[in-house]
Amino acid sequence: MKRILLATACAWAVFAQPTFAAPGDIDPALLADHIKVLSSDAFEGRGPATPGETKTVQFMTDQFKAVGLQPGGDLKDGQRAWTQDVPLAKFDITGPISVGVKVGGQTQAWTQGEQIAIRAAETGADHVTLKDVPVVFVGYGVKAPERKWDDFKGVDLKGKIALVLVNDPDFETGQGDFGGKAMTYYGRWTYKYEEAARQGAAGFIVIHETAPAAYGWNTVKNSNTNTVFDIIRADPTKDHAPVEAWIQRDVTVDLFKAAGLDFEALKKQAQTRAFKPVTLTGVTFSADYAVKAEKIVSKNVVGVLPGTKRPNETVIYSAHWDHLGVGLPDAKGDKIYNGALDNASGSSMLIEIARQFAQAPRTDRSVVFLSVTAEEKGLLGSEYYGANPLYPLATTVGDINMDGIATNGPAHDFTTSGDAPLTLQDDLIAIGKAHGRNYSPDPRPGAGSFFRSDHFPFAKRGVPALSFGGGQDLVNGGKARGEALAKAFVTDRYHQPADEYSPDWDLTGAVQDGGLLYELGRKLANSDEWPEWKAGSEFKAERDKTAAARK
């Protein structure tokens, strides 16, 4: 889950009822029941390619069948299956990890998960060995010709480790060429690692700071010291350098001091076009560890309700079923990352919105319910679907994604991940307004949430797509309580074993949010509307290429 959704809407009964023939409100008890099952220890954190996946895929399939969907997955012998195969490469660091630095001739050993968090290399190599390689600070690691920005200035990074700041050059000032506080794709750690491969570096190590990363070190540690997945690539070295890792900020500051450098001063320089890479004199990096690589096939679960008039036009609801599986223990010794809010809750909502559609009259367009794998590994299930769509993207009306639901009761507002220049978002806002709900822009634009949920692989291919977020202006406690609860979740539970179901959750807000999303999808599925990206959107040109298919 890539943005934190904790609360939503006002009391549904106060507002006018929807204009369509609704089958009734979503049942909060059913939402809770699904979440309890999916986030139970028996499902072992729902890691892809584990027994937890087998149980989860079976559960989602059984639920889709029970509510009345039809199979919507791969075609096999002329019939749709309930799943779409998602072939992936799986990487694990095996055995001991030797990692550290020499500073002024003195060796400092680092501990995996403490000073550094190394991801299993996705290059296809079975061993990574670096010995006393130079370390270079490359600012934000951005090469953006259209912005006349180049943090590398021709430096040769072959055989070197680069230290790179997270987020964009203008995150801290809120002004500049990278969206101000709102993150661009250049700010994502995924971009940093892609650029490492293009620069030919031995590796990029991202410097962790809580505010620009939008999460604490525990999240970094738990996400990166676990099994790593990727799509199958013909040449993985074109997309991944041998070392991909994160480093603690304080460790970095000490390295800079040892090299006679001021971290904060250099970070200020890195926020300007004039920045040039800086070698950490007297500092070298070493690492040695084995990597086990396997090819596996994970599963997206897909159900469909075919349209009665235009079945080739498709509205998609999506949510990821996976979480982090079993990983490093927390302070209590708990190793199961249950992922109750992230994203057993969104999976539960997917089932219950499907139930609403199945109980109502069929729509003119088809409605697809897509439960995707490996979101936590880089949006891989939705990325694979986007590259291998079961239903043509040109005639996909839009994707409505759910990554977490409201657990703290109703709110006066709602939001989306990023403020998309999109008429689909306008439609959602209009529906919310009709029910007395206000739209609040993404409260954490610097977190880059738009790039961090399963709507993004659709969006970058031109499909109108949004990821819904519950509001923080709670009916009980207002914005102060909503913001405090959201912050507490990020700090204490996000990507940690503590993300567990609680009987104290109030799902009445989730019920109301589900009503908005159901109404939005049903409106689209019974109309001839084609939502559009607005002028200036980076995704509009891609959508316009297929305009003829929608006439």
Image: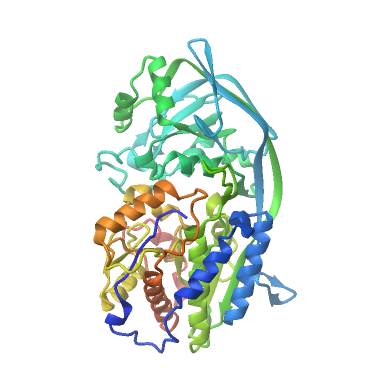
Query: In the figure, is residue 328 to the left or right of 474?
Result: right
Q: Residue at x 27, y 72 (%)?
A: 437
Q: Position of residue 233 (x, y in %)?
A: 64, 47
Q: Nearer the viewer, residue 116 or 89?
A: 116
Q: How many labels, in total?
A: 0
Query: In the figure, is residue 282 to the left or right of 326?
Result: left
Colour mode?
A: rainbow
Q: Is residue 338 above or below residue 165?
A: below
Q: Nearer the viewer, residue 138 or 61?
A: 61
Q: Is residue 224 above or below residue 82?
A: above
Q: Position of residue 15 (x, y in %)?
A: 28, 81
Q: Residue furthest right?
A: 77
Q: Residue at x 65, y 41 (%)?
A: 92
Q: Position of residue 222 (x, y in %)?
A: 53, 43
Q: Quadrant of residue 150?
A: top left
Q: Quadrant of residue 238?
A: top right
Q: Is residue 184 above or below residue 399?
A: above
Residue 234 seen in the current view: no
Q: Nearer the viewer, residue 320 or 140?
A: 320
Query: In the figure, is residue 152 to the left or right of 300?
Result: left
Q: Position of residue 426 (x, y in %)?
A: 31, 70
Query: In the figure, is residue 264 to the left or right of 2?
Result: left
Q: Residue at x 50, y 48 (%)?
A: 496
| Quarter the C terminus occupies | bottom left
Residue 523 seen in the current view: yes
